[in-house]
Amino acid sequence: MILVFIIGYLAIAFEHQIKINKASSALITGVICWTIYVFAVTAHVQVHHELLEHMGEISGILFFLLGAMTIVELIDAHDGFEVISSSISTTDKRRMLLIISVIAFFLSAVLDNLTTTIVLISLTSRLIKENKDKLVFAAMTVIAANAGGAWSPIGDVTTTMLWIGGQITSVEVMKEVFLPSVISVIIPFLGLAYTLKDKLTKPEININAVKNSSVKERNLVLLVGLLSLLFVPAFKTLTGLPPFMGMLFSLGVMWLITELIHSKKDSLDKDNLSVNYAIRKIDTPSILFFLGILISVSALQSAGVLNIVSDKLTALIGNQKIIVIVLGVLSAIIDNVPLVAATQGMYSLAEFPQDHPFWLFIAYCTGTGGSILIIGSAAGVAAMGLTNIEFFWYVKKVSFWAFLGYISGALLFLAMNW
């Protein structure tokens, strides 16, 4: 199973060299991993039960992604992002990168890193013409969004898991992880900003898609869309239901409002402004790629491979601080959610009480470590699909700076807490 996962991982990494779509490689890898697992054990019913349990969690993430991407596409179809992009007048690429990084860092703490990445990549595509600059901005958005999610209890799935599990409290994680997260953004920003030269060239605005939408309708859709996205974490906090439920409700409200404001128009006039149009524009292969990655990792988790890795780390290293740092690096290769779940199972609150630096350090490392590789986080996977970032382009241009920022933030955390 490990061998299949490695081969699949390499196929994803060498996507452009072997000319096979990464979604195909991810889906095949995931199914083969589960097939190996089901033939390796006698309790087939138990395997089926585990698969369905994992699919429940995975489908929640996919529905969340589907809803967020649809809402963003709907705003874009009404030219809603033009309201924001027109207010950003700077043509200095480095200053623009700073603005986007700051927005991503703080917005992801309120929304989450995945939604923030989708929104900001859609926004920057209207601000930047050159494709090579779009890639740099997308990479920095992922780094800033992941770092912003690490210090907020609702900003990243792993931080939320620790928060719900009682390992951390919201006040302590914000107080202790905020500054290390800032450092993990500043260093990659300085490294990537240095590569940006000349002035910003904005793409020409295509008005064809909004010719049937008035300024009033555009502003209304933008306002409702942003409020809908902000409603999701509030809904989760109030009800305790998974985030995808809030996202589906928000999508339903957006659907209803857009149907009402365009109800008097002909079908031909309102087609490009409808939810049906937005759904058709969604990058479905990216969602399927995400599905393949998640079912692959869930197979490793069910087979106990991730627990074995955690046990080996404890036996080989011993030092808790180094173990957590290594877990952060591993989260760039293997999804951070099962790694944190395994850690929660290995260490009890009796050994490390609530808000112990150990738990807070896990929140930082697993939240920001995923930025080291483009497929190390949900935000990175989304960016990979939206902007066609190549795996090895990210490794060559971004991974060093992301790793340097990650290690610098980790050292600052250790200096502050241990």
Image (cartoon, grey):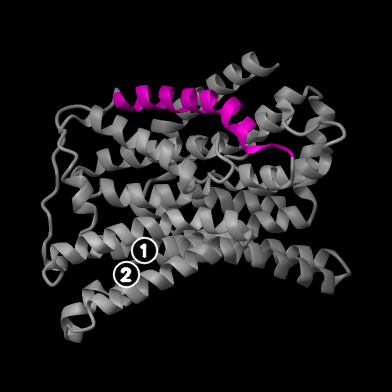
Q: Residue furthest front?
A: 238
Residue at x-position 11% and y-position 67%: 208
- Label 1 near label 2: C-beta < 8 Å? yes
Image x and y of residue 217, in percent: 20, 66
- Using the image, tell me which numbered label, if any, was put on residue 71: 1
Q: Is residue 359 visible?
A: yes
- Using the image, tell me which numbered label, if any, was put on residue 278: 2
Residue type at mark 1 is Ile
- 227 horizontally vs 28: left or right: left
The image quadrant where one finds the N terminus is: bottom right
Q: Is residue 288 visible?
A: no
The image quadrant where one finds the C terminus is: top right
- 262 horizontally vs 135: left or right: left
Magenta part of the protein: which range?
167-193
| Image quadrant in which you'd find residue 268 | bottom left
Image x and y of residue 159, in percent: 62, 42
Under tag 1, what secondary structure?
helix
- 397 horizontally vs 298: left or right: left
Residue type at mark 2 is Ala
Looking at the rendered structure, the number of numbered marks drawn on it comes to 2
| Image quadrant in which you'd find residue 108 | top left
Residue at x-position 32% and y-position 41%: 135
